[in-house]
């Protein structure tokens, strides 16, 4: 095991891109003619830079921490930004309103559409300092969600406050977007930490410390100092230290922490959150004791990121060793990382904050490796199951579903053994994801989505057959509590992934599916067969068509017709002795008694278009 947090920071600092981004923020924040954002191009990279803005426009006191639903009655962000429990992501209301105002009153959306129509992919870097960093973060999420062609967005912020909650972070992480965000934070900069405390405990202090927009980027921090600033800074510092863990806001992406000793990158959200507090608590350790000195540090470090970048680049070539004790190269790497972040004495809390996620990452890696091995074994069982059932079906005019429903369980015990083995494997994975024992983006990985979908489409029809065999047609597989959770979860994985795919990623089928895409199809057939039987019995007894049953059967017609049109159904469904074909023949015969009904039948037309015997 090893950690490269310090090396990653040195590499990023040495890239001209960060220095260029900081230069853009200084340029635009000192330009009073720019109201919303600035746009410039450098070596085929487009920089869209948001000014620092006035902190008074950012404050929101509607709730303790100023949070609100990211949709918030707007259509800018989709409802895909939500948790597994369907709770919406929360963001800071002040930041959201400022971003929506920019969208309404500027040509930002027009510019994005223009770039999306270019022939080559365009890298766009959204940049922001201070409050502008929060706006840049939301702008990047907005573009990532739109999935505009030819646009590759990146976000770089300096001294930016936090923006979203755990749900937003998980949504972004699941999509693999976390790597698109890089936040640069100085050790004593108060702004990235200010939302760790509720507004009522920091609002007055923030307004005392920071001036209106325009002067916030002045080099001389003394010119920003108000007579009340030292006391306000002390109160602000104390409130953040005490209340940091209660805040709903969580970090997004990679954080690069600066100090006079260097820089280090941290990616784990929980580790970043702890380091935001711990590095600030470490302020007095480095000789900043007087209130005036603390106030100067909190303010000056918010406007001097250019100096920090140059310092890291200049010191990158020097070799140094850690003063902190360690027992391994992995622990030495963490120790060097902590020193670069400003810890000059052993701090067990900070050490554990960085080491814990690395240990977990290593464990997750081993778990994934074991799951990959198990998946290979399960795929062999899948192949055996598919071969066995198709061998039984060969030369038969019945579907795989019908054959399995009538299998002799004792004679064909191997089939059930394989079903049980596959069931246990996927139950374990679903439980691990539920308990967050696997990476957040695990269920968005194509490998596992495809494997889960293949399993569900092959095996769930067999589970349905077993269900109706045991229930003797009395139960309903589709009723709440009857369908296994694993199938519902695996289906949701696919649905969530499909929502992230644009229209150009979905090509229409030219052939029928080898396995019916809706793995619950045969349960719908079983229920349609029961509805038809009940309808016939009702008609014989009362000489009246039951409207509810008729509507249910018509809905089933529409459902099957759509699958035929999209070719998402398997051809085995139409075999002469399949349950569906048996149902269809009975249904059509019954419909013939009612000319108006059969004349409007969408399924009749679909079946005729198949050029089959109907």
Image (cartoon, helix red, strand yellow):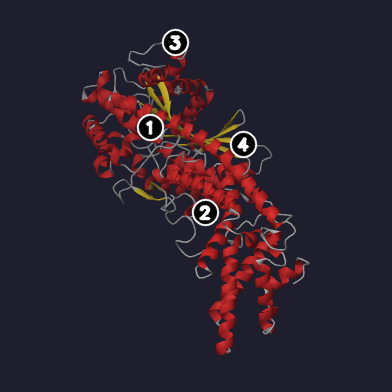
Disc 1 versus disc 3: nearer the observer: 1
The dot on residue 481 is none
Of the image marks 4 and 2, the number of the one nearer the N terminus? 4
User: First in sequence: mark 3 or mark 2?
Assistant: 3
Q: Which residue is mark 1?
A: 272
Q: Position of residue 538 (x, y in %)?
A: 55, 84
Between marks 1 and 2 in the image, the one whose residue lies nearer the viewer: 2
Neighbours of disc 2 within 10 Å: few (<14), some (14-19), many (20+)? many
Does residue 447 appear left or right of residue 87 in this picture?
Answer: right
Residue 329 vertical position relative to residue 177 in the rendered view, above or below: above
> Where residue 3 sits in the image (x, y, percent)?
44, 23
Q: Residue at 57% across / 64% down in the picture?
A: 523
Residue in the image at 56% along x and 88% along y = 541
Residue tagged by mark 3? 318
Q: Nearer the viewer, residue 256 or 33?
A: 256
Q: Which residue is mark 4?
A: 122
The residue singled out by tag 2 in the image is 487
């Amino acid at each position: 095991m090893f950690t490269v947090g310090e090396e990653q920071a040195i590499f990023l600092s040495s890239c001209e891109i960060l220095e260029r981004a900081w230069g853009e923020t200084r340029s635009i924040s000192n330009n009073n003619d720019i109201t919303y954002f600035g746009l410039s191009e450098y070596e085929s990279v487009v920089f869209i830079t948001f000014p620092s803005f006035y902190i008074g426009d950012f404050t929101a006191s509607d709730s303790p921490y100023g949070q609100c639903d990211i949709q918030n009655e707007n259509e800018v962000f989709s409802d895909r930004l939500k948790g597994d429990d369907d709770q919406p992501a929360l963001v800071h209301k002040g930041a959201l309103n400022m971003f929506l105002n920019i969208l309404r009153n500027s040509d930002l959306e027009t510019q994005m559409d223009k770039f999306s129509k270019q022939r080559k992919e365009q890298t766009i870097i959204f940049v922001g300092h201070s409050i502008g960093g929060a706006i840049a973060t939301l702008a990047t999420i907005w573009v990532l969600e739109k999935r505009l062609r030819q646009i590759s967005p990146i976000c770089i912020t300096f001294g930016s406050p936090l923006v979203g909650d755990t749900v937003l972070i998980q949504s972004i992480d699941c999509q693999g977007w976390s790597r698109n965000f890089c936040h640069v934070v100085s050790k004593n900069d108060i702004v990235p930490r200010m939302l760790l405390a509720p507004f009522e405990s920091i609002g007055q202090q923030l307004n005392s410390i920071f001036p209106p927009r325009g002067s916030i980027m002045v080099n001389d921090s003394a010119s920003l100092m108000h007579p009340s600033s030292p006391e306000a800074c002390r109160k602000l510092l104390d409130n953040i230290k005490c209340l940091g863990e209660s805040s709903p806001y969580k970090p997004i992406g990679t954080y690069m922490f600066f100090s006079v000793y260097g820089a280090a990158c941290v990616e784990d959200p929980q580790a970043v959150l702890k380091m935001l507090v711990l590095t600030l608590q470490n302020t007095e350790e480095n000789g900043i004791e007087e209130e005036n000195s603390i106030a100067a540090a909190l303010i000056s470090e918010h406007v001097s990121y250019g100096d920090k970048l140059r310092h890291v680049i200049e010191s990158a070539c020097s070799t140094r060793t850690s003063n902190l004790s360690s027992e391994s190269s992995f622990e030495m790497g963490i120790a060097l990382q902590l020193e670069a972040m400003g810890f000059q004495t052993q701090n067990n809390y900070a050490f554990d904050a960085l080491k814990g996620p690395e240990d977990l990452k290593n464990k997750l890696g081993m778990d994934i490796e074991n799951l990959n091995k198990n998946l290979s074994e399960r795929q062999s069982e899948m192949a055996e199951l598919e071969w066995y059932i198709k061998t039984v079906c060969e030369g038969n005019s019945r579907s795989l579903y019908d054959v399995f429903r009538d299998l002799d369980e004792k004679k064909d015990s191997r089939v059930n053994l394989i079903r049980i083995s596959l069931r246990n494997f996927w139950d374990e994975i679903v439980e691990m994801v539920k308990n967050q024992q696997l990476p957040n983006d695990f269920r968005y990985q194509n490998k596992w989505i495809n494997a889960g979908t293949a399993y569900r489409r092959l095996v769930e029809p067999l589970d349905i057959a077993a269900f109706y065999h045991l229930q003797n047609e009395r139960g309903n597989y589709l009723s709440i509590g009857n369908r296994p959770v694993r199938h519902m979860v695996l289906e949701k994985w696919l649905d969530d992934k499909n929502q992230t795919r644009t229209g150009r990623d979905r090509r229409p089928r030219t052939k029928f599916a080898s396995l019916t895409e809706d793995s619950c199809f045969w349960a719908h057939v079983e229920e349609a067969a029961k509805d038809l039987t009940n309808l016939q019995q009702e008609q014989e007894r009362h000489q009246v068509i039951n409207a509810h049953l008729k509507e249910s059967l018509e809905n089933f017609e529409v459902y099957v017709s759509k699958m035929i049109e999209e070719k998402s159904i398997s051809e085995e469904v139409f075999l002469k002795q399949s349950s569906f074909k048996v149902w269809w023949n009975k249904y059509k015969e019954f419909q013939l008694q009612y000319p108006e009904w059969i004349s409007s039948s969408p399924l009749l037309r679909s079946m005729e278009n198949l050029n089959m015997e109907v």
